[in-house]
């Protein structure tokens, strides 16, 4: 005796297997597998870089009451020079002998946290100019052009008339935006991070 339903069960099995195969192919095709696109792994790396950058700026911007933070002191002592990583130190741009090295709190923490991990980074200062009508962006540290997946973290530093001493730091390019007030200027410190 023959079972007339056997062919139907076989066709149902083949159809179910085909549907399952199509679902698996679609799921694999829908997820990105290349490292150059914004895949889940890449987003995870960007998030880690953002947290690391925020921690660096947060640690440098902490100060006991009545004292300036280390980040604020670095902004005040900056002479307007752009510095480039030479392989062993941050040297003033154009200084082939590396006689003028960057030596501040920002340099120390970046050297300790980012250099060893191969994380490229730039540090930029944006501040008001021309009595507060425009702004200027200057680089303190330049490590190359950021990739498309670079992360930017920033911290604003308010400078007051009593903070800056132009006789001690005459080359600091940050100017008083309004001499009639005690506010000297506002500096946006940007830390740009990306994997090389």
Image (spheres, helix red, strand yellow):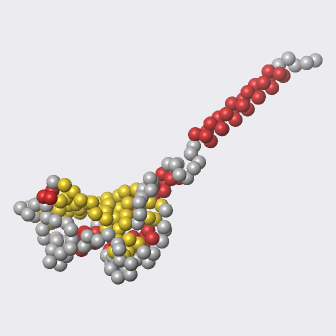
At 76% from the left edge and 29% from the top edge, which residue is drawn?
14
Residue farthest right in this picture: 1
Residue 88, given in percent of the width and then of the height, sits at 44, 77
- 75 vs 177, left or right, is right
Q: Quadrant of the N terminus?
A: top right
Provide residue 157's location: percent of width, then percent of height: 23, 63
Residue 160 in view of the camera: yes
Name the side, left or right, on which 53 lies relative to 75. right
Q: Is residue 49 something one can see in this rendering? A: no
Name the residue nearer the viewer: 88 or 109.
Answer: 88
Depth check, front residue: 126 or 17:
126
Left or right side of 176 for 125? right
Residue at coordinates 45% horizontally, 54% vertically from top-left? 149
Q: Can you tell which quarter of the image residue 128 is in?
A: bottom left
Residue 98, x across and y down, in percent = 37, 80
Residue at 21% over, 68% down: 173
Q: Is residue 147 above or below residue 56?
A: above
The answer to whether 60 appears left or right of 161 in the picture is right
In the picture as drawn, the residue positioned furthest to the left comes out as: 180
* Residue 119 to residue 1: above or below: below
């Amino acid at each position: 005796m023959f079972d007339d339903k056997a062919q139907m069960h076989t066709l149902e099995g083949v159809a179910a297997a085909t549907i399952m195969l199509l679902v698996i192919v679609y799921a694999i095709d829908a997820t990105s597998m290349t490292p150059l696109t914004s895949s889940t792994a890449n987003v995870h790396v960007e998030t880690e870089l953002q947290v690391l950058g925020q921690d660096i700026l947060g640690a440098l911007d902490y100060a006991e009451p009545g004292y300036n933070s280390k980040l604020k002191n670095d902004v005040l002592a900056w002479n307007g020079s752009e510095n480039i990583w030479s392989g062993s130190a941050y040297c003033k741009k154009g200084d082939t002998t590396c006689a003028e090295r960057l030596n501040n709190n920002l340099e120390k923490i970046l050297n300790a946290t980012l250099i060893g991990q191969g994380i490229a980074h730039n540090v930029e200062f944006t501040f008001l100019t021309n009595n507060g009508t425009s702004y200027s962006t200057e680089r303190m540290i330049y490590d190359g052009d950021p990739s498309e997946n670079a992360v930017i973290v920033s911290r604003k530093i308010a400078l007051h008339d009593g903070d800056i001493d132009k006789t001690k730091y005459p080359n600091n390019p940050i100017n008083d935006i309004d001499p009639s007030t005690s506010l000297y200027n506002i500096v946006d410190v940007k830390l740009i991070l990306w994997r090389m």
